[in-house]
């Protein structure tokens, strides 16, 4: 059996409506920023009955030792990471580990045959192993890549039903691809386009670094990774998959912004003929997903922070052959934990919005 076969094919029932309030979930890398968001969202998820958190650095300590907003969950403790323990009786395993760690332990994890694996790292996002190697160095388990489905939840939707292994997209890639997908699926993507994208400091994880230290970051704004950003691998991989062409590319120009959470991405495209009326086009493209909202004006990061929503806006200029699409997301929710949970809901055929309907905080 391959991981893309449905759970029912594997003898486990996952018929619609079969997911009651009884899921057991384990989270590896639970003391990190993304792992913490997975815990925060799953602790009140209507289908999750059991939630275990694994952390080397915080083993036997309460969750609040890493995530201070969880002080009220005083009886919840981190456990020492152990694949067999994490998978014992768990239906779903989330991996929120640094790049390179998931590929080290994935064959052992697959042997345990959990109902669903959701990997939040870059390890299994790029189906073209050579493209992966160009951006990240040699993959240690390329034979396992085909087990995974790229889980851009608002685009893949019901295609994720029954999947057993999901690769959750990167935060920049999520914003960039949400801007491009309607054009790609309508055959309107020009051969080249450019995305200017800015991120907050939480994108770099929980370990303090010189580029995330508040005094150096708070009043600064700068470009980085201009020669090649790693997320270009999964963007390129998706564009090839969506268009069937290796000629189509979209550059990602990343910037570091003085904020903690959020991504603002602006894509500039020039087509051979006028684009369709932009707002109506994007509204129709995303009508089937509750988590992408088309806004009347350019979206604000502050309006999506703390939510699983993407706000998107598009305009055309001049004779209509020039289009600008701009997207705002929370990098740790729509760009990581929230999207991964939405993908879990879809894979298990339960309500895709379960546990994710909360609004953000404002101001
Ligand atoms: N931050 C974002 O906005 C974002 C968005 C999308 C995707 N992601 C991806 O999500 C994953 C987690 O990111 P993050 O921002 O949560 O990172 P993080 O805050 O640094 O957390 C990573 C966790 O992994 C555990 N870990 C296991 N092996 C490790 C090792 N060899 N070195 C360091 N840590 C290790 C650590 O916990 P213990 O030592 O306690 O076990 C650590 O808490 C990454 O693959 C990242 O690319 C991040």
Image (cartoon, rainbow, N blue to C red):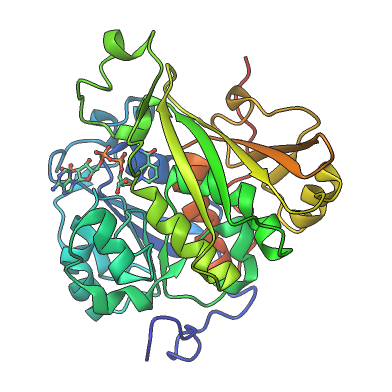
- Left or right: residue 37 versus residue 17 is left
- Left or right: residue 239 versus residue 134 is right
**Residue 49 in the image: above or below residue 348:** above
Q: Position of residue 117 (x, y in %)?
A: 36, 67
Marker count (numbered): 0
Q: Split into 4 quadrants, where in the image is the C terminus?
A: top right
| Residue at image point 20% right, 24% down | 209
**Residue 123 in the image: above or below residue 192:** below
| Residue at image point 18% right, 69% down | 84
Within the image, what quadrant is residue 354 found in?
Answer: bottom right
| Residue at image point 29% right, 69% down | 130
- Left or right: residue 320 versus residue 52 is right
Which residue occupies the foreground of this view, 158 or 219?
A: 219
Q: Position of residue 148 (x, y in %)?
A: 39, 72
- Left or right: residue 316 versus residue 216 is right
Within the image, what quadrant is residue 158 found in?
Answer: bottom right
Within the image, what quadrant is residue 126 found in?
Answer: bottom left
Q: Quadrant of ligand 1?
A: top left
Q: Where is residue 103 in the image (x, y as percent from the top left)?
A: 21, 65
**Residue 282 in the image: above or below residue 15:** above
Say if residue 352 shows up in the picture: no
| Residue at image point 33% right, 67% down | 90
Q: Position of residue 291 (x, y in %)?
A: 67, 47
Say if residue 79 shows up in the picture: yes
Q: Split into 4 quadrants, where in the image is the N terminus?
A: bottom left
């Amino acid at each position: 059996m391959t991981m893309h076969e449905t759970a029912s094919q594997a003898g486990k029932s996952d018929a619609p409506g079969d997911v009651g309030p009884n899921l057991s979930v384990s989270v590896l890398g639970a003391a990190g920023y993304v792992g913490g968001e997975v815990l925060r969202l799953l602790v009140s998820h209507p289908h999750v009955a059991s939630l275990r958190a694994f952390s080397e650095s915080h083993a036997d300590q309460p969750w609040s030792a890493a995530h201070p907003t969880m002080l009220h969950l005083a009886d919840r403790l981190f456990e020492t990471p152990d694949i067999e323990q994490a998978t014992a009786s768990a239906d779903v395993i989330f991996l929120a580990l640094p790049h390179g760690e998931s590929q080290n332990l994935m064959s052992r994890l697959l042997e345990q045959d959990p109902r669903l694996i959701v990997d939040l790292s870059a390890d299994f996002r790029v189906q073209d192993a050579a493209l992966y190697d160009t951006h990240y160095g040699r993959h240690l388990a390329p034979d396992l890549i085909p087990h995974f489905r790229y889980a851009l939840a608002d685009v893949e939707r019901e295609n994720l039903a029954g999947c057993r292994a999901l690769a959750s997209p990167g935060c920049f890639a999520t914003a960039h691809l949400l801007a491009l997908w309607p054009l790609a699926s309508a055959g309107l993507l020009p051969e080249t386009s450019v995305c200017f994208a800015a991120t907050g400091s939480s994108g770099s994880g929980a370990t303090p670094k010189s580029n995330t230290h508040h005094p150096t970051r708070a009043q600064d704004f700068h470009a980085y990774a201009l020669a090649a950003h790693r997320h270009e691998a999964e963007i390129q991989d998706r564009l090839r998959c969506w268009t069937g062409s290796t000629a189509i590319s979209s550059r990602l120009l990343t910037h570091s912004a003085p904020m903690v959470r959020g991504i603002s991405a602006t894509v500039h495209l020039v087509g051979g003929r006028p684009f369709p009326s932009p707002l109506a086009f994007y509204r129709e493209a995303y009508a089937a997903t509750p988590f992408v909202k088309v806004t009347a004006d350019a979206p604000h990061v502050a309006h999506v922070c703390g939510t699983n929503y993407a706000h998107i806006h598009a305009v055309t200029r001049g004779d209509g052959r020039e289009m600008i699409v701009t997207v705002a997301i929370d990098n740790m929710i729509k760009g990581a934990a929230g999207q991964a949970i939405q993908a879990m809901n879809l894979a298990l055929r339960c309500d895709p919005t379960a546990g994710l309907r909360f609004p953000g905080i404002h101001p």
